Amino acid sequence: MNEISVFLDDYRQAPEGYVLAETIDECLILLKNYEIDHLSLDHDLASYTRNGLMLVKIMVEKQLFANRITIHSANSTGGKAMYNCFKQAQSDYLMPQSINVYLRPMPLSPFTSRMLSIYKK
């Protein structure tokens, strides 16, 4: 099965080479049906209750992971909660230790080419 990279966000455009998911339901479908190399997550979505943190909790519960995970949310509180949830799952052996989890907030303004080159590293 080919690997894909997924970008969950309802406001920003996905970087080149990423599949855009605008809701947690779209993201869950991709997680269930594809091997995900890199998953980049936003916290704030159109639904205030069905947000990035809810997705993270579902991912841990259902054991749906990517090879690498980045939280790119500009919401510092929400992004940190998502990051901490993943790290706690790793501490509790509910998520593989080998998965690298990054917290790299991105501004809501459009991408610049410099931002994209840094982000893909």
Image (cartoon, rainbow, N blue to C red):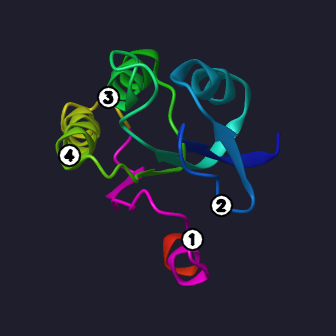
Q: Which residue in the structure is indicated by mark 2?
A: 15
Q: Earlier in the sequence, mark 3 or mark 1?
A: 3
- Residue, x 32% and y 28% (percent of image)? 53
In depth, the one of 78 and 39 nearer the eye is: 78
- Please state which amino acid type lies under the numbered disc 4: Lys
Determine crowd level at label 4: few under 14, some 14-19, many 20+ residues with C-alpha closer than 10 A. some
Mark 3 lies on a secondary structure that is helix
- Please state which amino acid type lies under the numbered disc 1: Lys
Residue 50 spot, x, y in % from top left: 40, 17
Residue 67 spot, x, y in % from top left: 54, 49
Q: Main secondary structure of the magenta part?
A: loop
In depth, the one of 43 and 66 nearer the eye is: 43
The label number, if any, that marks residue 53 in the structure image: 3
In depth, the one of 45 and 33 nearer the eye is: 45
Mark 2 lies on a secondary structure that is loop
Q: Which residue in the structure is indicated by mark 4?
A: 80
In magenta, the rendered stretch is 96-116
Q: Classify residue 36 by image quadrant.
A: top right
Q: State the residue lying farthest toward the front.
A: 109
Determine crowd level at label 2: few under 14, some 14-19, many 20+ residues with C-alpha closer than 10 A. some
Is mark 2 in CB contact (under 8 Å) with mark 1? yes
Q: Give how far apart the Cα atoms at labels 3 and 1 are.
A: 23 Å
- Residue, x 20% and y 46% (percent of image)? 80
Residue 84 spot, x, y in % from top left: 19, 41
Q: Earlier in the sequence, mark 2 or mark 4?
A: 2
Q: Earlier in the sequence, mark 2 or mark 1?
A: 2
Image depth: mark 2 or mark 1 in front: 2
> For residue 69: magenta?
no
